Image (spheres, grey):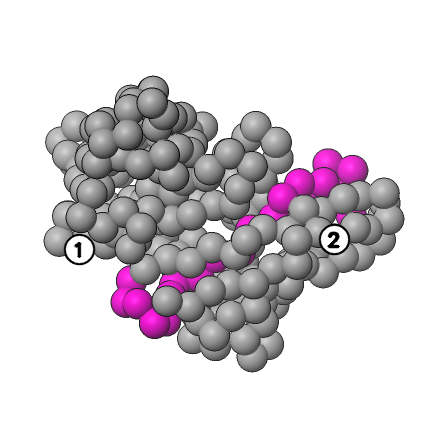
Amino acid sequence: EVQVVESGGGLVKPGGSLRLSCAASGFSFSSYSMNWVRQAPGKGLEWVSSISSSSNYIYHADSVKGRFTISRDNAKNSLYLQMNSLRVEDTAVYYCARELAAVGTELDVWGQGTTVIVSS
Amino acid sequence: SSELTQDPAVSVALGQTVRITCQGDSLRSYYASWYQQKPGQAPILVIYGKNNRPSGIPDRFSGSRSGNTASLTITGAQAEDEADYYCNSRDNSVNHHVLFGGGTKLTVL
């Protein structure tokens, strides 16, 4: 079964750090670009970061640039999001998603998400 | 950066046809993808490209584009189609960035 499973969420104080992980299985992980997308409570989806299959191309949304870093380990079929200098507004469910790359930005495999709460 | 605009809420009678739209300059250059999200669940890709459905998506879902507007059409809406729907595309003003629309809450009456 093709799936991705996120982990690493939790409660952290403003200014703190957290590292999210995403474990992929059932497909050739090293062949796909991957993304992180988040959803604040009661809000819509917000793209956070993307990374190409071999990590040559990395992009971050302006809202997280300089604070978050996306990375991957193809040998471990894993995607990561290092989040530093966390703010209250980073509170959200964070989804890991595979980029189909058939035509554009279609994200065809999503995990169930991991919840990050930034609060004092 | 650019943005994608969706109507916050749309309703449709059971069995009728509904169109959900997404507007933005990026859509003149890139196709939109569409996602369905039910409460407490992860999004699901329902339409991508010109009009492609992933395996398992019913054929009552279809997509189209005209100018700067992409549309998701549900022909013969079912009760289980009640959900939030999001569009996304590449951002044509910031290379390789990704945009999401604000989402449309679909109610099936």
Look at the picture and state if A5 lies above or below B78: above
Whole-percent x and y of residue A14? 28, 30
- The residue at the point 42 percent across, 58 percent down is B99
The magenta span reads B77-96
Whole-percent x and y of residue B93? 34, 72
Whole-percent x and y of residue A65? 22, 50
Label 2 is found on which chain of the structure?
B
Q: Is residue A85 visible?
A: yes
**Regarding mark 1 in the picture, which secondary structure is present there?**
loop
Residue under label 1: A57
**Label 2 amino acid?**
Val
Whether residues under marks 1 and 2 lie with C-beta atoms below 8 angstroms apart, the answer is: no
**Label 1 amino acid?**
Tyr
Q: Quadrant of residue B30?
A: bottom left
- Count every numbered label the image shows and give the total: 2
**Left or right of B3 on screen, residue A80:** left
Whole-percent x and y of residue A119? 36, 25
Q: Pick the residue in front: A92 or B106.
A: A92
Categorize mark 1 by other alpha carbons within 10 Å: few (<14), some (14-19), many (20+). Answer: few
Which disc, if any, is residue B10? 2
- The residue at the point 62 percent across, 35 percent down is B38
Q: Pick the residue in front: A103 or A71.
A: A71
**Regarding mark 2 in the picture, which secondary structure is present there?**
strand
- The residue at the point 42 percent across, 68 percent down is B2
Quarter of the figure with the C terminus of chain A: top left
Q: Furthest-bottom residue in view? A: B67
Query: Residue A33 in magenta?
Result: no
Categorize mark 2 by other alpha carbons within 10 Å: few (<14), some (14-19), many (20+). Answer: some
**Left or right of A102 on screen, residue B54:** right
